[in-house]
Amino acid sequence: MNERSGIGNALLSVVVPCFNEEAVIGETLNRLAAFCDQLEGFTVELIFVDDGSRDNTRAILKARAQLDASVRVVGFARNFGHQIAVSAGIDAARGDAVVLIDADLQDPPEVIHEMIELWRAGFDVIYGTRTEREGESFFKKTTAKAFYRLLNHLSDVAIPFDTGDFRLMSRPVVDALRAMPERDRFIRGMVSWVGFRQVALPYKRASRFAGESKYPLRKMIRFAVDGILSFSTKPLQIAIGFGMFSALLALAGIVYALTLRIFTNIWIEGWTAIMIAVLFLGGGQLICLGILGEYVGRIYREVKRRPMYVVQEYVGFSVQEPSSLRNPTATAQ
């Protein structure tokens, strides 16, 4: 393993996606500033990606950027979603190492110190594994565990259990992620896919400092679907298996009916059995069409080749920097 203990004055980029975080963003800025003050041997850039917030989140960030040269803001033209915001931050990051952390302070910034030590020891990805999850309901904890285990069962790539996007990545990993153009992003799965030397860092996840979760049940389901469909074709294989099972079941029913008719005087009667068969097959066909439609829809989004996101403004960047980003759609301020 190649150690990086000799690296001096490295640049660390901290990417923070934000959406309607007015209640917590001030404390997030203060905690990250305190973290920067404690850090030795690094220059730090704090990249906040405002995902089309409808409150004063961007105004607070822009005001701090005027006072602190390390604070930079990428302001989206509308809400594009958490994973796209993370991707935009990765595109904008110039650091030798890049940290992903949410703005709600559930992932303590102080844990980054431990990540840096492991990065210096030679690891390329240090991902936080949650040993405890304060302030989260039993339902959310249970469904999260079930999701990660189902995802690993279906996926061709092993994705760590109980792990979110909170992680530190080396520059080679970041460059590999930037080279991956897909629109339906599942960052933690993509990081697992690229490989390199990866290690888990257990930590205790705190409750939200303020505000509300940006992942209600509907978004959690959509996120789970994205994770499964982005890293597995097994749902299609399951659909094929279900179709074969239905066909065999129907064939067995036909043989049974013909046997009764030819060798006995009994007829298969009753609309109930027919309705059950029709509803069973019809429901199965619709489920299979829905699975197929999800994959086709992803192909459709990819072939349109639209930008992954549209930036309304860059704040705190130099004039030259936005031209190097994946979607240079706005000027720097």
Image (cartoon, helix red, strand yellow):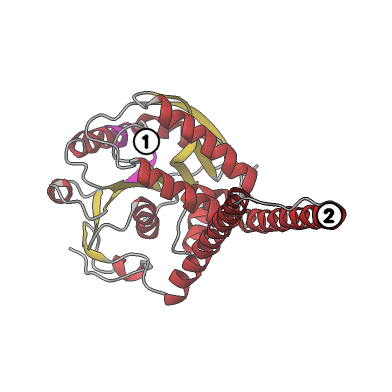
In the image, which disc is placed on residue 40? 1
Query: Residue 44 is drawn in which quadrant?
Result: top left
Q: Nearer the viewer, mark 2 or mark 1?
A: 2
Task: Locate the N terminus by quadrant.
Answer: top right
The magenta stretch spans residue 50: no
Precedes in sequence: disc 2 or disc 1 = 1
**Which structural element holds mark 1?**
loop
Report x, y in % for residue 262.
85, 58
Side of 5 relative to 264 (left or right): left
The answer to whether the residue labelled 2 contacts the one labelled 1, judged by CB atoms less than 8 Å apart, is no
- The residue range painted magenta reads 34-45
Residue at 35% in and 35% down: 39
Residue 127: numbered disc: none
Q: Nearer the viewer, residue 297 or 189?
A: 297
Seen as rendered, the residue at the extreme front is 265
| Residue identified by numbered label 2 | 259
User: Which class describes the residues within 10 Å of circle 2: few (<14), some (14-19), or many (20+)?
Assistant: few
Which amino acid, by three-letter code, is at mark 2? Thr
Indicate the position of residue 180 as horizontal and vertical percent values: 51, 63
| Label 2 SS | helix
